[in-house]
Image: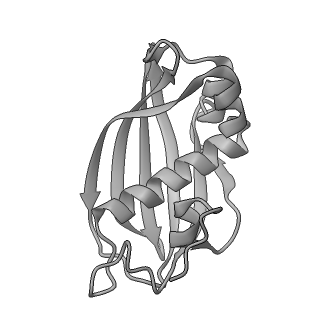
Amino acid sequence: MTYNINQPICRQMFSYKSHSLPSLAIDKSTIVYDLFISIAPKTTVICDFLFSPGTPAYLTLLEEARWDLITKNGYGLDVIKKTGLGPTVLSVTLKFSKELHARDEVVIETQMNAYERKIGQLSQKIMRDGDVCCEANFVIGLFCMTKRKLVLPTDAWLHAVGMI
């Protein structure tokens, strides 16, 4: 695989089938956000010799979906650079149900479950043909890069993650 240093690494690993779209509302404060991804077939960086993605590949897919969500909701890198406030993952729990393979077309479902004070709870599912292949639960926060600590979420951040 040829790497172009001007492209983000996630774009080199995964090819997109279509654009992400917000889907059904869950309870007026939380939406489910879907991202459609096709796993690139010749990606030795993320697939083992059986063409099965390793754990870092799953985490990269999930991260790409989270960045897609916040960027499309108006909180991209330009806002992070301007405000000095950006997302951070405090912990993650993964549960694997079915194996993914090269050329699989998957949907990543992202849902913000709660945000209390400085701490948010976010869940994601990687689904293939309607079957859940991986479930992830994240504890996230908004990090101030100048103070080097978590801060209370701004309205713009809460909007970006789908809470308002």
What residue is at 66 percent from the left and 29 percent from the top? 81
Nearest to the observer: residue 26 or residue 155: 155
Residue 2 location, x and y as percent?
A: 55, 80
Q: Quadrant of residue 49?
A: bottom left
Residue 56 location, x and y as percent?
A: 33, 60
Instruction: Tell me: residue 141, above or below residue 33.
Output: above
Horizontal side of residue 117 vs 67, given as left or right = left
Instruction: Tell me: residue 139, above or below residue 47.
Output: above
Residue 76 visible in this rendered orientation of the protein: no
Horizontal side of residue 21 vs 158, given as left or right = right
What residue is at 38 percent from the left and 56 percent from the top? 59
Horizontal side of residue 6 vs 147, given as left or right = right
Residue 85 location, x and y as percent?
A: 58, 23
Nearest to the observer: residue 128 or residue 81: 81
What is the quadrant of the C terminus in the image? Answer: top right
How many discs mark residues in the rendered view?
A: 0
What residue is at 47 percent from the left and 23 percent from the top? 115
Instruction: Tell me: residue 69, above or below residue 82.
Output: below
